[in-house]
Amino acid sequence: SGIIMGNEAKGVSNSILKSVDKKAKLPMFGKIESLNVSVACGVFLYEAIRQRQLS
């Protein structure tokens, strides 16, 4: 398994999106429009680890 991250400008290509099992987005609140991909990846990895520890 893996996590595929896209950038702000181009995101993830349609060919890759067609082959994934699940898609996810980070909810954005307030005046924040986007996150640096390294920050977004850190948030996703933190949540993945957190959920695995709860199982």
Image (cartoon, rainbow, N blue to C red):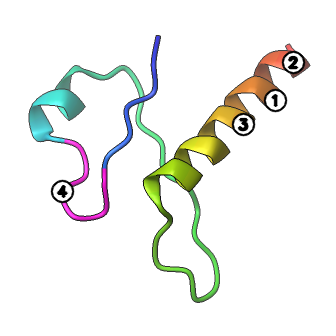
Amino acid type for the residue under numbered disc 2: Gln
Left or right: 51, with 53 as reference point = left
Answer with the quarter of the image where residue 10 lies. Answer: bottom left
Element carrying mark 4: loop
Q: What element carries label 3?
A: helix
Q: Between marks 3 and 4, how big is the CA–CA gap?
A: 24 Å
State yes or no: discs 2 and 1 in contact (Cβ < 8 Å). yes
Disc 2 from disc 3: Cα separation: 10 Å
Q: Which of marks 2 and 4 is nearer the N terminus?
A: 4
Residue density around tag 3, few if under 14, some if 14–19, many if 20 or more, within 10 Å = few
- According to the picture, the residue beneath numbered tag 1 turns out to be 50
Residue at (72, 36) in percent of width and height: 47
Residue 18, located in which quarter of the rendered image?
top left
Which residue shows up at 45% across the image and 18% down it? Answer: 2
How far apart marks 4 and 1 lie (CA) works out to: 29 Å
**Around disc 2, counting alpha carbons within 10 Å, would you say few (fewer than 14), some (14 to 19), or many (20 or more)?**
few
**Percent coordinates x, y for residue 35 in the rendering:** 50, 65
* Marks 2 and 4, how far apart at CA: 33 Å
Pointer 3 residue? 47
Q: What stretch is highlighted in magenta?
A: 7-12
Secondary element under disc 1, as helix, strand or loop, is helix
Q: What residue type is labelled 1?
A: Arg
In the image as oriented, which residue stretches furthest toward the left? 15
Magenta stretch, overall SS: loop
Q: Pointers 3 and 1 in contact (CB under 8 A)?
A: yes
Drawn side of residue 25 relative to residue 9, left or right: right
Position of residue 54 relative to residue 32, above or below, is: above
Ranked by sequence position, the earlier of labels 3 and 4 is: 4
What's the mark number on residue 53?
A: 2
Task: Give the residue type that dot 3 points to.
Answer: Glu
Q: Nearer the viewer, mark 2 or mark 4?
A: 4
